Amino acid sequence: MGNILTSRKQDYAQWYNDLVLKSGLAEYSAVRGCMVIKPYGFGLWENMRDQLDRMFKETGHQNAYFPIFIPKSFLSKEAAHVDGFAKECAVVTHYRLKNDPDGNGVIVDPEAKLEEELIVRPTSETIIWNSYKNWIQSYRDLPILVNQWANVVRWEMRTRLFLRTAEFLWQEGHTAHATKEEAIQETKQMLNVYATFVEEYMALPVIKGVKTESERFAGAEDTYCIEALMQDGKALQAGTSHFLGQNFAKAFDVKFSDKDNNMEYVWATSWGVSTRLIGALIMAHSDDDGLVLPPKIAPLQVVIVPIYNKDEAATEKINTTADELIKELRAKGIRVKFDNDEGRRPGWKFAQYELQGVPVRVTLGARDMENGLAEVARRDTKEKENCSLDDVAGKVVSLMDEVQDGLYNKALNFRNEHITKVDSWDEFVSVLNDKGGFVSAHWDGTAETEDKIKEMTKATIRCIPLDNVQEEGKCVLTGKPSKERVLFAKAY
RNA sequence: CGGGAAGUGGCGCAGGCCGGUAGCGCAUCUGGUUUGGGACCAGGGGGUCGCAGGUUCGAAUCCUGUCUUCCCGACCA
């Protein structure tokens, strides 16, 4: 077997890069920090997107679309918001090019300067709330439950395929409510939608929690999040849902008259997940031979590989068997492909589909035909089993669930084994450095302590878990009293 | 923006110190033999060596400038 990938042990970051590139998910583009999402990677995103979209609609949301450009003045209307994003905005200053008088191609036409610069959206709260001002007059106009599928740009200093690109695809929900309680309810509801999606479809267990003040979204009152754990022991924020209070309503002067004819500011939420989820998926499940994808979102769920020889009758039998199997599997809604490309040998195909993480492979060999058998192999455990041709379809169908559950349970065990309760500073440091994962420790609740810990260990507070047990304790750094543990980790 | 490294056929690299016909592996094309874990044999095609100057009879190689990318840090979903 060719070691096409750098192994995880040797260099985890390089393994990740190799994997993304060689499995055909994405590649670098001509633009710094921006990637090309290739058909295989986009197929994966489409499956994720479609499922999330269904879940958003089931919870009463509708899709809409707002401009990619935001007038510069909008960004300064909410103070915390501009602080958070100002340093990473792409700015459009001109609207025309012209031929260079010196003959060096084209230049920006200095005559074509925009009156007001336009910001390429890093997130859309401002442009959306500018519209909501016009949409909302009365409590009867509320709630507004809108989602947008879009690209956004954040001019990051350092980028990584899927995990942090300058441009990325995401969805952003922006809702408006008459009451604080309803907005908070919405924030929590969407966090649950995310958690359900990531756990059930991506087979990745998450911890639901609240961010501390310093990790909060710029402009939010509360940021809820789901945190996942990667194989290298680092945490990854997989999705966020923000309770925005009345901050944006006040900034954009969005008021409504309630039943008693009083003018009130609107309550807001926003929530989003991005193509970063693909990065999470890769790092959570894959191995040194390639991707391992959960069946529910794999672009291709089953591949059938024929092994021919010179016997034409056997070839014929393989082809008709494959055709029947495809028909049967497709009837059950399974995404299946028959790879009968004679330019590639079986061994090459085995390695290729393993690299691409196809959950199940069915091998139909000339030799098997005589015995009425097929070999069924699952990607996650590498187990192979000979199966009577009559049972193959049923076997494949049941494997879809078995692989999905197997991946989730494996990730769950790993995650649970990597939540370590710690009560002393020495232990805190050694667990972070030697074991990795989440460290559950007491914290005195101050941003100063949080900063100091980050500076000393590079670990941040990932979240305060929602279902947190209340218990008396002492801050792991300062020894000051604390009433609950929080989760620390090094993070992506 | 600070610190490293690198730009040579599609991809990965060698050559550079010591200037003299651009080379290797993979991929690709043609023909054939093969097919149970990344096949083999034979033949072929493809590169103004990142860009711009300079030195020289002659530059991938030496000099100057410049651009870009990747990795490590501060920032971030």
Image (spheres, rainbow, N blue to C red):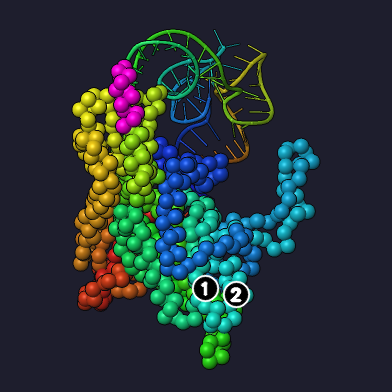
**Residue for point 32% across, 23% down:** A315
- Residue A11 appears at what percent x and percent y? 33, 41
Q: Verify CB contact (< 8 Å) between mark 2 and mark 1.
A: yes
Q: Indicate the amino acid at tag 2.
A: Trp
Provide residue A170's location: percent of width, then percent of height: 48, 57
Disc 1 residue crowd, few under 14, some 14–19, many 20+, Cα 10 Å: some
Which picture quadrant has residue A134?
bottom right
Specify which label sits upstream in the sequence, 2 or 1. 2
Residue at left offset 30%, top offset 63% = A207
Q: Which residue is mark 2?
A: A135
Give the chain of mark 2. Answer: A
Query: Is residue A156 depicted above or below A440 in this figure?
Result: above
| Vertical order, A298 against A235 (above or below) | above
* Residue A144 numbered tag: 1
Task: Give the secondary structure at mark 2.
Answer: helix
Residue A329 horizontal/vertical position (percent): 33, 42
Residue A309: within the magenta? yes
Quadrant assignment for the N terminus of chain A: top left
Residues rendered magenta in the picture: A306-321
Above-or-below relation of A412 to A423: above
Seen in the image, is A32 located left or right of residue A330?
right
Looking at this view, is A277 or A15 the one in front? A277
Residue closer to the observer: A113 or A275? A275
Q: Nearer the viewer, residue A292 or A49?
A: A49
Image point 34% across, 55% down: which residue?
A201
Chain identifier of the residue bearing label 1 in the image: A
